[in-house]
Amino acid sequence: MPRIAVEQSLSHIAEMLRSNGYDVVDLGNRQQTVDAVVITGLDENIMGVENKTFAGAPVISAEGLTAEEVFHEVHERCSPTSHHS
């Protein structure tokens, strides 16, 4: 199950992700490895999302997006592809 770190102010998005089978953790918990990070977009530098803890995990800005659009972004980036080469 993909683990997604979500900024605290985005509780509606965290709830949507949880109800769709994602393991959601608070963005402030830097001890956990995550598959993606969802932020508001306002605090990119203040939150320190450039921190190496998130290296390799896509950072998705929820700014200007609906919860459904954010979910789609997370799903696209974290779901294993069904295409086999």
Image (cartoon, rainbow, N blue to C red):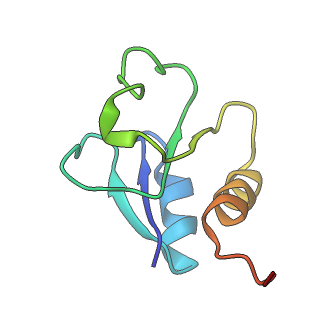
Q: What's the residue at 68%, 51% (across, down)? A: 70
Q: Is residue 48 left or right of residue 39?
A: left
Q: Residue at x 24, y 55 (%)?
A: 32
What is the tally of numbered marks visible in this picture? 0
Query: Does residue 8 appear in this view?
Result: no
Residue 28, percent from left and from top: 26, 40
- In the orientation shown, which residue stands out farthest toward the left? 31
Residue 27 shows in this picture: yes
Q: Quadrant of residue 25?
A: bottom left
Q: Looking at this view, name the residue that lies furthest to the top.
A: 45
Instruction: Specify the quadrant that holds the C terminus.
Output: bottom right
70 and 35: which one is in front?
35
Name the residue located 51 percent from the left edge and 80 percent from the top edge. 21
Residue 61: quadrant of the picture: top right
Between 84 and 23, the one nearer to me in the picture:
84
Question: Which is more toward the observer, 39 or 51?
Answer: 51
Residue at the image point whose x is 35% and y is 22% from the top: 48
